[in-house]
Amino acid sequence: MDGRAVAPAAGTVLNALATGTGSAFALDLETTATVTLSDDPLVNATITDAPDADTSLIERCVALTLERYEPAADLDATPLGAQVTTGSDVPMASGLKSSSAAANATVLATLDALDIGEEVDRLEACLVGVEAARDAGVTITGALDDASASMLGGVTVTDNTEDRLLKREQVDWHAAIYTPPEQAFSADADVDACTRIASTAEVVAELALDGRYTDAMTVNGFAFCGALEHSPAPMLEALPDAAGVSLSGTGPSYVAVGDRPTLETVCDRWAERPGTTRLVETRNDGTQIR
Ligand SMILES: Nc1ncnc2c1ncn2[C@@H]1O[C@H](COP(=O)(O)OP(=O)(O)OP(=O)(O)O)[C@@H](O)[C@H]1O
Ligand SMILES: O=C(O)C1=C[C@@H](O)[C@@H](O)[C@H](O)C1
């Protein structure tokens, strides 16, 4: 009756706030969820190292997963509730899809606790997390772009309006990440400003669907820095050396991709700024039961 799963963070190719079409890729920063089922009819949640953070997303993930899948599980006793605990390397509300990683890890850990983790289709499990994120009010579009990249690995392109996966491809990039020392919750983003750049977002979507992800992310970055009032200066510090660079999600993080020596130079420039700089690889394996 115990389950455990690990989900990666993600970076942005196209922010879906302008048109509903989005694109993201998995990054090697992880969130772990452990779930212990119980006969106590409550879901108790703990976020390690963030005792004041909002636990409604992971509570809803456990509740929805139990509601949908418990009837298919072959357990001796019917669990009524659970204890869920997450621990994470992904900074919260920083544009690196902490919410998608927490949701995916929690849904798969709950399925693992029900002992049906390998039987449920990964995209179906991902959609449970998207539904929970909508219910918890932590997303604007449902963020299937971020959630699918974290669940399936690689880069994905999605239509978040219809919850459809349009494309998935494996990528092997290195990624430099700069995270300024503030938070930006997706639910607080200026959606009206984003919809004003819809025609630019359509061009970014065409580039991404054509496999030109790095060009797509750079165009996305300049457009969304404008709409969401984040500085384009960290992007200019990464160019022209990086293959692509963007504001990630609703910020404040920036992610650049390319080869490792080039990105080491980008990290050296970003390290002059306040905040945290990381150099990681992309991930093609997505969320795993472990
Ligand atoms: N480790 C975690 N454990 C449990 N819940 C988490 C965790 N990390 C994030 N969350 C939930 O996600 C919310 C933050 O979601 P938000 O979409 O603003 O951040 P993000 O996913 O990091 O940002 P972005 O979508 O721009 O990448 C938190 O308030 C919390 O409810
Ligand atoms: O809340 C949302 O719907 C989103 C938030 C950001 O991560 C975006 O990058 C994503 O495309 C959509």
Image: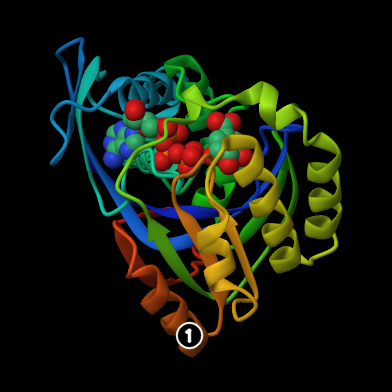
Could you tell me the amino acid type at mark 1?
Arg
**Residue 6 in view in this figure:** yes
**Residue 216 image offset from top left, x and y in percent:** 74, 59
User: In the image as oriented, which residue stretches furthest toward the top?
Assistant: 41
**Residue 12 image offset from top left, x and y in percent:** 58, 52
Q: Where, quadrant-wise, is the N terminus in this rendering?
A: top left
Q: In which quarter of the image is residue 35?
A: top left
Q: In this view, does 197 lie to the left or right of 173?
A: right
**Residue 114 in view in this figure:** no
Q: What's the residue at 13%, 30% (across, down)?
A: 51
Foreground residue, 158 or 11?
11
Q: In this view, does 143 lie to the left or right of 46?
A: right
Foreground residue, 268 or 160?
268
Q: What sort of colour scheme is used for the picture? A: rainbow
Q: What's the residue at 15%, 40% (across, down)?
A: 48
Q: In this view, does 10 lie above or below 283?
A: above
Q: Give the quarter the ligand 2 occupies.
A: top right
User: In the image as oriented, which residue stretches furthest toward the bottom?
Assistant: 261
Q: Where, quadrant-wise, is the C terminus in this rendering?
A: bottom left
Element under disc 1: helix
Callout 1: 10 Å neighbours few (<14), some, many (20+)?
Answer: some
Q: In which quarter of the image is residue 241?
A: bottom right
Q: Is residue 267 above or below residue 235?
A: below
Q: What's the residue at 37%, 78% (across, down)?
A: 268
- Residue position marked by numbered label 1 in the rendering: 260
Foreground residue, 251 or 83?
251
Q: What's the residue at 53%, 59% (across, down)?
A: 233
